[in-house]
Image (spheres, rainbow, N blue to C red):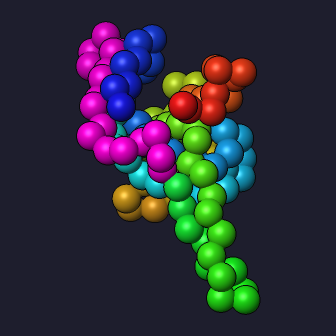
Amino acid sequence: MQVNASGLPPNTTFVLFLTELPVPPFGAVEYVGDLTTNASGQASVRVNAIIEEAFSSQLLSDGSRQRVELDHIVFWFGDPAADDVCLGAGQGPVTPFDGDGEAGTAAMSSKNFLPGAPLP
C-alpha cells in the first residue's frame, strides 16, 4: 500500500492504522506505519503487507472466533500536542493510537472517500 499526502502540517508525524470502522469508535484496529511530513507538509510511506485481505479475529465468549474485516484507513496525529494547529492548544483529545499510548485526534479517515471505501 502506498500512501501519499500533501497539505498537512509540516514536520509532523502521523500514525497509520487499518480499522474496522471509518469513524469512532473505529472497532478493531491494526497499526501499519508512521507517516512523517516534510517542511512543505508532504509525506509518503509504503507499507509492504497484504492489505487487501486484512482482518482481525476476535475470541467470543463461547470460545469461537469471529472474523472482523479491516477495510478502512485512519491516521492520527502521532502526538497529542501536534493537533494544536487544528484544534487549539490543549483542545484535542489524547487517544491511545500510538506506541506510547498517547496520540492526538484522528486527522484523516477513509470515510472522507466514501462511497469508494472500503478498500478493495
Residue 36, quarter of picture: top left
Magenta-colored stretch includes residue 37: yes
Residue 33, quarter of picture: top left
Give residue 105's position: percent from left, percent from top. Answer: 58, 41
Front one among 52 and 78: 52
Front one among 50 and 38: 50
Image quadrant in which the N terminus is located: top left
Q: Is 21 located above or below residue 83 in the figure?
A: below
User: How many numbered marks appear?
Assistant: 0
- Residue for point 26% across, 19% down: 38
- Tell me the magenta residue range: 36-54
- Residue for point 65% across, 88% down: 63
Give residue 15's position: percent from left, percent from top. Answer: 41, 42
- Main secondary structure of the magenta stretch: loop
Residue 47, quarter of picture: top left
**Is residue 58 visible in this depiction of the protein?**
yes
Front one among 28 and 95: 28
Q: Is 39 located above or below residue 95 in the figure?
A: above
- Residue for point 30% across, 23% down: 44
Question: Is residue 81 rendered to the left or right of residue 20?
Answer: left
Q: Is 66 located above or below residue 11 in the figure?
A: below
Question: Is residue 35 rendered to the left or right of residue 103?
Answer: left
Image quadrant in which the C terminus is located: top right
Front one among 54 and 77: 54
Give residue 101's position: percent from left, percent from top. Answer: 46, 61
**Is residue 112 visible in this depiction of the protein?**
no
- Looking at this view, name the residue that lies furthest to the bottom: 62
Give residue 69's position: percent from left, percent from top. Answer: 60, 51
- Residue for point 65% across, 82% down: 64
Magenta-colored stretch includes residue 10: no
Question: Is residue 46 rendered to the left or right of residue 77?
Answer: left
